[in-house]
Image (cartoon, rainbow, N blue to C red):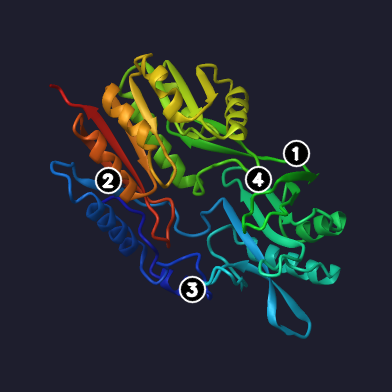
Amino acid sequence: MSATLSSPTEAQLRCRHFGTCGGCSLQDKSYPEQLKQKQDAVRSALSGFDGLPALDILGAPSPWNYRNKMEFSFGDVYPPEEGRWLKLGLKPKGRWYEVLDLEECLLPSPQAAALLAAVRSWAQREKIPPYNSHKKEGVLRHLVIREAKNRPERMVVLVTTDGLIAKNSFINAVLSCYPATTILLGSNAKASDTAVSDSLDVIMGPGHITETLYFPDGAVDYRISPHSFFQTNTAGTEILYGLLRSWVRGLGTGLVLDLYCGGGGIALSVAGAARKVVGVESNVAAVRDAKANAERNGITNCEFYHASVETILPSLLDMRPAAVIVDPPRAGLHAQAAAILGEMAPPVIFYVSCNPQSLARDLKTLLPRYRVEELRCVDLFPHTDHIETVARLALRIS
């Protein structure tokens, strides 16, 4: 088992909110213990399959301050307290209708705690009420931060019901303690408790940040917009995408399909090892990001299409790709897409999974035609139950 070991004092560094906050569940375990628990969970999910290769696990380079995106929520204080009527933090464990007022969080950068305190004080000074989901009233809903880890760029997004706040004073509050390079104001008047905005107003900076992923044989820049998907652990993503890059390089030059490609994270990472990469994504904003990222890097052998995977897949497989990379949502492959892959049978499939149960379900469809040649876990989420699993599938020789 390859893993990054925790320091002897790691247990003493636990967040003071551990046990109450719903953001982490494993901070009471050493990092090696966390990795073993995750490895065992994947083994259990895949226990129904015979002949699988040994399951290796790669630990995160650092188990602390690794997250490049956090979504914090506003809430009101009930019963009311004199001088304190607003909370800003995360949801308590098992109580998604409340907000835990955070004094610290060890997952994003160390400056995040100061930002929460500054925004909380700003909101109380300006007398801006938090949104109450039961009463369907209030203004402040979410505070979202996105942080480049390999570049000095950071984004802050304030999500409100109507976007009508004192912009200059908010900018000043953020910059008093947090090195933001762009700040946006979002509006979300829907009843659903989501940090996604219906509209966005850039009030400082370019409205996006850029992150760079470094690999042993090159680097790729990514423009990250407020709603872009980007793996939340930058250093861990370099390991994950670097593994896929090496697998693609081992195939020789050929066509590679990247299904559920998002903003082009995987496609652009493997482009230098392939003759051509075609990405498919149903989110039109993500496709725009993918194309912009390709242009920024001068990558000309990538094409991106806005379409549902199950609709366009037969036409793409007719192009006889050397490999197909799938990185589906947590629910796994669309049933029709899995059936098409099993029927049309490209020679190699690289399956990236964030849900071992979904992976096991999809393997039931694929393994009659394929064998698993390699199986690895990559930990992108220290202190949580989540784990990424990567499977390399090769077509069986009949």
- Identify which amino acid the numbered label 1 is placed on: Pro
x 77%, y 85%: residue: 82
| Residue 173: percent from left, percent from top | 79, 61
Q: Residues within 10 Å of mark 4 (few under 14, many from 20)?
A: few
Q: Reading the chain from its start, which is encountered first: label 3 or label 2?
A: 3
Q: Tell me the CA gap for discs 3 and 2.
A: 31 Å
In this rendered view, identify the residue nearer to me: 119 or 220: 119
Measured in 3D between alpha carbons, the distance from the residue under mark 4 to the one under mark 2, in whole angstroms, is: 40 Å
* 332 left or right, relative to 159: left
Which residue position holds label 1? 206
Is 337 above or below relative to 390?
above
- Per the image, the residue denoted by label 4 is 152
Q: Picture coordinates of residue 70 (x, y %)?
A: 59, 56
Pick whichever of labels 1 and 3 is earlier in the sequence: 3
Query: Toward which corner of the image does residue 148 lie, by quadrant?
Result: top right
User: Within 10 angstroms of label 3, few (less than 14), some, or many (20 or more) residues?
Assistant: some
| Circle 3 SS class | loop
Disc number at residue 18?
3
The residue beneath circle 2 is 360
